[in-house]
Image: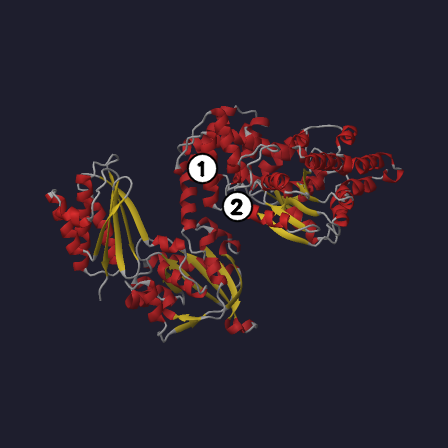
Amino acid sequence: MSDFGQNRAFFAHLAEDLTGRERELERLGEFAESGPGRALLVSSAPGTGASEILKALYENRFVRSHDTVPVYFKFEATDATARDAAQRFLHEFLLQLIAFRRGEPGIATSFPGLQELEGMAPPADEAWIRDLIRSCYRDTELSTDAAFIAKALGTPQRAAVVGAKSLVILDGLEASLIFESGSLIPEALGRIYANGDCSVILSGNSSFVSEAANQGRFGKIEAERMSVEPLEFEDAGRLFEAITRSRGVESSEQARDLAVKILGCRTYFIQALLENAAEHGSSLRNFREVLACYFDSALSGRIAGYYDDILISAASGEKRTELLELLESAYEQNSPTDLSSWVKRLRSADALRYLESKEVISLKAGRVLPGASEILKDYVRSRTALEVRGEPEAKIVSRGVGEGLKRAAGKMAAHYRGRSSLGIASVLASFDCQTVPAAMFDYQEFKKKFKGTDRSGIIRKMSSESKSVLLPQVFHSDSAAAFYGPLSRLIESDRVALAVGFENAQYDDENEVTWIAAEIDSKLEANEELTAFWCDRLEMVAVANDIRRFKTWLIAPEGFSQAATEVLKSRGAYGSSKEQALLLKALLTKGEVSKEEEAAANFSFTIPIGDDTELIAAHAVEDIARRSGFKPKEINQIKTALVEACINAAEHSLSPDKKIRVDAGFDGTALLITVSNRGVRFAGSITEAEEGSEQRRGWGLRLIRSLMDDVRYERVDDGSRLTMSKKKRG
């Protein structure tokens, strides 16, 4: 991605604004290099920064391409008619073509009229550009909108005939929904780019692009597809950090995570929040500061500006106020409203389709639902309070921050639970008539036979198990909350799933079966009461959906008590621990345990130096060793070695931050522990340390070596690191 975002001659965005979009940029770069006459449909969720990605491609091609002319054009809601948009495209195309052919990017950012463009054209292009401009405005056959639009939008194909092949990027196609005669645009594009030497990228919001393509409104264009979705959480965090560094906004990890979460990992809103913070010199170090900046932006900053533009485009003047009131009422009712009432008040069905493309509303079966975005909801409530009820801005922001703080902790807790979830719907979706050991679904049996055995050992032993379960062939898997709404008040939607399939792949009523599964919370083995509660809930899903044959499956982090297991058996349900479920997932996908799952088996913590804090570390590692199946004598040896290592680090390092970091993990054969600290670095080997003048250190290291199987004293730039391991025996 290093070539993207470096040239600021056109759109003045920085490379860090493209953080997290490496895959999309690579895909677009491959398309641009693939030759003429191709088409690509790019669909994007609103606010995901698709336009910035396409602009970066344009800049990249302007600098790197030697013969193919890059052209970027975005349809805007301010174009009142399709003819206006086509006329603006003609002007932009010629302007960018001349800038490229003359090698002068500054021309592309100037605003000469069409008559001036004739004089600016290179000699090789002057004649056909002059003829084109004159024919567009003088030929009587172009008096109809359809003819003019076809001529103007078809300019790239005409340029290709005289040797000026181009890569045309047409962005913001959903704006055509509110143009007068807007349907002429996709129809014209379908005819123009069905054949020819120009490559084209057609981009718009997902609902518009999908609907237009499915209905054949792009004619016979054979296009590849690409989608731009909200960033993954980690990538959104990287974007947030990159922008805070470049804009000089002070932040913290906790504040970053909350901001990314409430902004839905959407590029535009992350940029908007941080730009507002930079403009006001605000820091984002904690939840209060993030929420204060967020609600200020949603009321009168860049986030408000984003939605203002959408609403004004769909309903200007008094209609915009009516639209705000309709949206607030819909949020308050929390239920679908009749489409006819919206059309009656706004007097435009096309405006509603435009709002749907921007995810402001959702249209389903003659009903209107408000957009699901929390950002939109906060904007609507803030602006309605300001514009309709006349409340002071300070009061609105204060109320928003207070409400935001109330839900922030729960929002982040739900997020962290979601990140640690199995993805139960995807596990069920992988069921395809496999035969798996019955112990995968019986925690007490699993505990009796395999507790303390490493994963590879469990899989080896399970291969000889006589009891097995034949899984169905699943053809549909989704969140169970989508089938039974009350579940969403009890559990996150991605932790409860319903899958429908057929046993033995026999497609008849007798063999159709539904699995209903949930990941439940329990710090210890789930008890009898909790298990019965969730069995009731999952059985209610079956009752509410009139499901005759079903199997329920509960997954608890530490499995189920003996009494809870009896409850499961009496209800014909399965019960597994998180470890069992992960093993099943690995077996079904025929792959290795993922890096995230592997990392989950490793532990890292930092302790302050002093006050016997090494004992806290020892207790933590004791629990890790016990879980890994070490014997009591071995556990005591490990604890003693760790305490000595921490004491050595504390006494001899002169640590500036007065902290010691401990990392511990079991790899299936041995427990590996690393003790590291900043401060004075020991320059010699462990043998030299044992034999050195510092008697206490030498004695401590000799003791550690006598207790552990392998000990290494490693040199690091700033401080010391002692790594030791203990093999599990028998």
Residue beneath disc 1: 241
Image-quadrant location for residue 538? bottom left
Which disc number belongs to residue 22? 2
Front of the two marks 2 and 1: 2
Query: Is residue 636 visible from the viewing direction of this image?
Result: no
- Mark 2 and mark 1 lie on one chain; the one further toward the N terminus is 2
Q: CA distance from mark 2 to mark 1?
A: 16 Å
Where residue 206 sits in the image (x, y, percent)? 62, 47
Amino acid at the residue labelled 2? Glu
The structure residue drawn at horizontal position 48% and vertical position 29%, both measured from the top left corner, is 277
Where residue 272 sits in the image (x, y, percent)? 53, 33
Residue nearer the viewer, 273 or 288: 273
Residue nearer the viewer, 229 or 474: 229
SS assignment at label 1: helix
Q: Is residue 591 above or below residue 335?
A: below
Residue nearer the viewer, 318 or 623: 623
Q: Is residue 565 above or below residue 494?
A: below
